[in-house]
């Protein structure tokens, strides 16, 4: 590290603070301005903000580890979520904007009825805002700490003080400027982070040890470049493989069954927050589509190239250290100036995720926990101050979780298993009138039972434990649904009149004396074509980068067909504005 590197880092920190001060006045007027930017975000800012948030300091490291273990096809662990992402885009983005709620959790208030609603609302706000949110921030902190350890050989309490400083920097601009400042800095942070990632990939692949794309291909073991995995157990002849059961879990179940931050079935978390903050329903759809294509199809390739190169450059890394291949490549191949730029890129990725998680966590804890418990009438300014104080409390709680979390993959697995089976309720609550608050509560708690039984009683491992948890959770919430009373027709009628989702709402439509609102075949056609488009772009870009010319023709044709059918099936404006198709 030279003076140039340190100046780049300092300049970036100053830039983020300045942006926060620029948007200060927009955030202080009300909670809607603070948490949803006054519902006035353009689609491209909202979409890129989603992408930036999912680009955390841990993301390139995680992709590096997946590629080192299973080649390119190892990314199916998260590529499968594109299917659910396009479902969110075509079926839910406009509904979230149309609902006009302040937070994801506030949806419970207008969708369900009964005394349980306030209790469930407070429980879910605390569960997502404090517990899950702190775990997510902890794993993001852990990734940045790993990078700092490798680069600067800093350990122990000094490292924790650095993390506190980094978090407080994010707090400074996010609490001053609200979502407007967070979203605008997200866009800048995304550009910086992607520029750094691309520069690193180009330098490493064209280094003397790799010898360009052709040299990379020549040195890699068989199967490393395959977009799809081989099935079976790994051996000397077949290095990159996964079980058929695991692949089926990814492709057929995980994308709709599991709650996972950034990939919630039906939308949720900061994704729902960005959709609700856009100018119109159409802006919410375009923002979410931009996010899905950029996040899954475009952004991963620079990381994948470095991950493939790391297989050759660092063959002796242990299984627990594979993610550090990316950091070693940064340290070994980047000259002064560029080394600082890459550290700024990682800092930008970190800041975008932390600021969003703090803003989102504070939104539901303020709106759905504190204000529900506090019956005093507060001014809008007092509510904003409460949100800022809650943000600082979140920082302290997250640092505590950071001190006790030991592995990133362990947190991933825990969150994925503890949300297994919840996804179907989050999807159907929009399209089936019979889902109630008890259904959602049962689906939130049942995975803990399923996970505990599978792990500690039956001693099953993934994917068997996962299928069991999803199945048990589904059976439990269905039983609970039919054993409890339906929601009040007045509440259901108000929700349905406002949102007009379509689906299985016949009793409510009869109560309202209104025509049936059909989901429509066009929406399903649009969803399938969007999936084809997304995977087509993903694999066409990979084929172009890796000089796989035959594959490039096939996947380019696949993406063009997907785009054309998507355009045909969505060009009717009524599909998005009236709730009918």
Image (tube, rainbow, N blue to C red):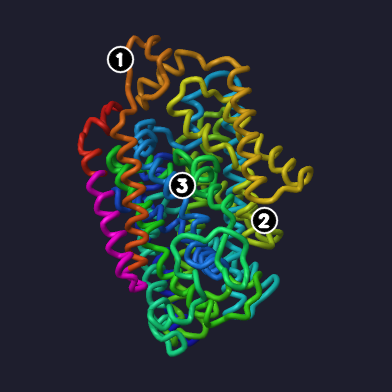
Q: Could you say whether the residue bearing mark 2 is in a helix, strand or loop?
A: helix
Residue 510 seen by the camera: yes
Alpha carbon separation for disc pair 1 and 2: 51 Å
| Residue drawn at the location 35% of the way across and 50% of the way down | 46
Residue that carries the numbered disc 2 in the rendered image: 401
Residues under numbered marks 3 and 2 in contact, where contact means CB atoms less than 8 Å apart: no
Q: Where in the figure is residue 416, as x and y percent of width and height?
A: 60, 48
| Residue drawn at the location 62% of the way across and 42% of the way down | 467
Alpha carbon separation for disc pair 3 and 2: 21 Å
The answer to whether residue 502 is above or below residue 180 is above
Range of the magenta residues? 544-565
Q: Could you say whether the residue bearing mark 3 is in a helix, strand or loop?
A: helix
Q: Which sits in the foreground, 423 or 189?
A: 423
Count residues near mark 2 (Cα–Cα under 10 Å), then give few for <14, some for 14-19, many for 20+: some
Q: Could you say whether the residue bearing mark 1 is in a helix, strand or loop?
A: loop
Q: Which mark is residue 270?
A: 3
Residue that carries the numbered disc 1 in the rendered image: 515
Residue 23 seen by the camera: no
The answer to whether residue 163 is above or below residue 368 is below
Task: Please indicate whether residue 270 sits to the left or right of residue 372 in the image.
Answer: left
């Amino acid at each position: 590290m030279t003076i140039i590197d340190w100046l780049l880092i300092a300049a970036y920190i100053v830039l983020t603070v300045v942006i926060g001060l620029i948007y200060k006045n927009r955030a202080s007027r009300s909670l809607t301005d603070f948490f949803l930017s006054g519902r006035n975000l353009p689609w491209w800012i909202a979409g890129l903000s989603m992408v930036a948030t999912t680009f955390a300091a841990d993301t390139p490291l995680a992709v590096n580890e997946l590629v080192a273990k299973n080649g390119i096809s190892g990314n199916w662990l998260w590529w499968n979520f594109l299917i659910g992402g396009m479902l969110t885009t075509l079926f839910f983005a406009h509904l979230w904007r149309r609902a006009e709620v302040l937070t994801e959790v506030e949806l419970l208030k207008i969708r369900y009825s009964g005394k349980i609603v306030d209790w469930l609302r407070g429980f879910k706000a605390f569960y997502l805002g404090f517990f899950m949110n702190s775990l997510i921030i902890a794993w993001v902190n852990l990734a940045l700490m790993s990078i700092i350890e490798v680069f600067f050989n800093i350990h122990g309490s000094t490292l924790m003080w650095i993390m506190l400083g980094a978090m407080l920097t994010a707090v400074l601009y996010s609490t001053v400027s609200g979502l407007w400042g967070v979203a605008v800095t997200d866009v800048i942070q995304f550009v910086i982070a992607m520029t750094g990632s691309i520069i690193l990939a180009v330098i490493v692949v064209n280094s003397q040890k790799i010898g360009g794309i052709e040299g990379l291909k020549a040195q890699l073991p068989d199967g490393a470049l395959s977009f799809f995995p081989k099935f079976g157990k790994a051996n000397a002849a077949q290095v990159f493989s996964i079980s058929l059961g695991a692949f089926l879990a990814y492709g057929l179940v995980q994308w709709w069954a599991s709650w996972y931050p950034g990939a919630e079935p039906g939308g949720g978390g900061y994704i729902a927050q960005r959709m609700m903050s856009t100018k119109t329903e159409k802006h919410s759809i375009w923002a979410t589509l931009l996010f899905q294509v950029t996040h899954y199809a475009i952004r991963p390739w620079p990381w994948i190239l470095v991950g493939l190169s790391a297989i050759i450059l660092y063959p002796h890394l242990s299984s627990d250290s594979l993610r550090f291949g990316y950091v070693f490549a940064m340290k070994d191949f980047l000259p002064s100036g560029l080394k600082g730029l890459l550290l700024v890129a990682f800092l930008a990725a970190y800041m975008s995720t932390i600021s969003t998680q703090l803003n989102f966590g504070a939104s539901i804890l303020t709106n759905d926990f504190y204000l529900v418990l506090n019956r005093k009438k507060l001014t809008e300014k007092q509510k904003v101050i409460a949100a800022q104080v809650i943000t600082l409390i979140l920082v302290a709680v997250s640092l505590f979780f950071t001190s006790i979390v030991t592995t990133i993959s362990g947190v991933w697995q825990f969150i994925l298993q503890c949300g297994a089976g919840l996804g179907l309720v989050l999807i159907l609550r929009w399209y089936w009138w019979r889902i109630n608050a008890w259904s959602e509560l049962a689906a939130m708690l049942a995975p803990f039972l399923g996970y505990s039984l599978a792990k500690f009683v039956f001693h099953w491992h993934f994917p068997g434990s996962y299928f069991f948890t999803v199945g048990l959770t589904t059976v439990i919430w269905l039983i609970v649904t039919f054993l409890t009373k339906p929601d009040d027709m007045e509440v259901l009628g108000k929700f349905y009149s406002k949102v007009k989702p379509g689906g299985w709402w016949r009793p409510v439509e009869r109560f309202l004396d209104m025509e049936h609102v059909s989901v429509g075949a066009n929406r399903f056609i649009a969803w399938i074509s969007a999936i084809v488009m997304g995977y087509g772009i993903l694999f066409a870009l990979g084929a172009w980068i890796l000089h796989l010319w035959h594959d490039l023709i096939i996947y380019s044709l696949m993406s063009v067909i997907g785009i054309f059918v998507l355009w045909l099936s969505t060009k009717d404006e009524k599909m998005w504005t009236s709730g009918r198709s």
